[in-house]
Amino acid sequence: MTSATEPIQMVDLKTQYERLRPDIDRRIQSVLDSTAFIKGPEVNRFEEALGAALDAHVVAVANGTDALQIALMALGVGPGDEVITPSFTFVATAEAASLLGAVPVFADIDPRTFTMDPASLETLITGRTRAIVPVHLFGQSADMDAIMDIANRHAIPVVEDTAQAIGSTWKDQAAGTRGAFGTLSFFPSKNLGCYGDGGAVMSRSAELAERARLIANHGSRKKYHNEVVGINSRLDTLQAAILQAKLPHLDDFTRRRREAADHYDAHFADIPGITTPHRSAHSHHVFHQYTLRIHRHRDRIHDALSEAGIPSAVYYPVPLHELPIYASSPDAHVRVPLPETGRAAREVLSLPMHTELTEEQQQRIAHVILSA
Ligand SMILES: Cc1ncc(COP(=O)(O)O)c(C=O)c1O
């Protein structure tokens, strides 16, 4: 039972674990007994189960950042190429391109969904554009019709950063399966999280998925016969076993998050100065984050929550183009104004969101915000 004095957490992994504990513990013990810590059978089984759920080929890798890098490597992205991404995202989205010597070029966002603005994307395409990486931020899909239309017209492949949106859709198709590749993260706080690092690359193309598998495995299909320069990126067997236990609950996790989002919406509807999350008509929102826009004094509300012992977070306070790693060469990365990116960074506030949130906790959170 949760009492009024019990601390509210941004993400409660413990209560969820307690609910699923017998199955998770049994699976972990079985891996320990087998000692097949690397490439155990659970990895393949998890890939197949997730692939069936998403209707895509899945290659499990070490984390979501590697997944992006592997997808870009599989598409041949390299030095001098340009990769268009939003600036309003986690750094890994752009970092993967930079690591390969490519130049991330930043697009602005749609102010309602916080995802890549297709109109901004279109103006950034040049002869050097080698990939487009939209991000399905906070749990709902970017406008994949518009993005794929632009990408197809220019014959540029799309990698969908789906780290925050497993279980989401674009027009009834799993998010992350429209482009050449989609990438996932199983970081513990993600909607499907393991107990360490984990990630996956997915594709509807068996050929592209095989290419990703090759790259993730040192560029080799057969041991000591390396065909291309690859990397070492594996999901370990323990994480695969944990993910196998959790995957059948993904729909329930999503339902719980959406219910919590509905309760928050009811508290904040029609409050002047606060905008609740927009729900796209074409994408099932899985609420990785519940992110309000607070038009004035966002930081004051952030502080008031903190003083009341309630966590909240600004995802993301610094747009990527303002980070020292990219701001030092602005002409390379910023070619169009990014006003909505800047405004979002000033206004967003993400509230506690997880599968175990209670209405009573949400009432306490809303009370502090509305009093402030
Ligand atoms: C949008 C986005 N892309 C990529 C990543 C990278 O995933 P990971 O932390 O598993 O490397 C994350 C999560 O951390 C993310 O939120």
Image (cartoon, rainbow, N blue to C red):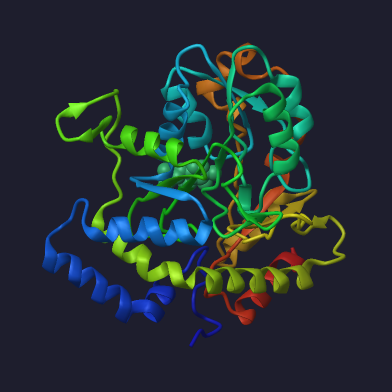
Note whether 274 is above or below 100 in the view shown: below
Q: Is residue 345 left or right of residue 189?
A: right
User: Does residue 337 appear in the picture of this structure?
Assistant: no
Q: Is residue 51 left or right of residue 298?
A: left
Residue 14 vs residue 186, the one in the foreground: 186
User: In the rendered image, which quarter contains the C terminus?
Assistant: bottom right
* Residue at image location 64% in from the left, 26% down from the top: 106
Note whether 82 is above or below 218 in the view shown: above
Estimate the x, y position of residue 215 in percent, counting from the top left.
33, 32
Estimate the x, y position of residue 208 in percent, counting from the top left.
45, 36
Residue 267 placement: quadrant: bottom right
* Residue at image location 13% in from the left, 65% down from the top: 34
* Residue at image location 26% in from the left, 71% down from the top: 27
Residue 73 vs residue 206, the one in the foreground: 206
Residue 242 vs residue 301, the one in the foreground: 242
Estimate the x, y position of residue 45 in percent, counting from the top left.
32, 61
Q: Is residue 195 left or right of residue 125?
A: left
Q: Is residue 237 left or right of residue 174?
A: left
Residue 173 placement: quadrant: bottom right
* Residue at image location 49% in from the left, 18% down from the top: 102
How many numbered discs, if any?
0
User: Does residue 7 appear in the picture of this structure?
Assistant: yes
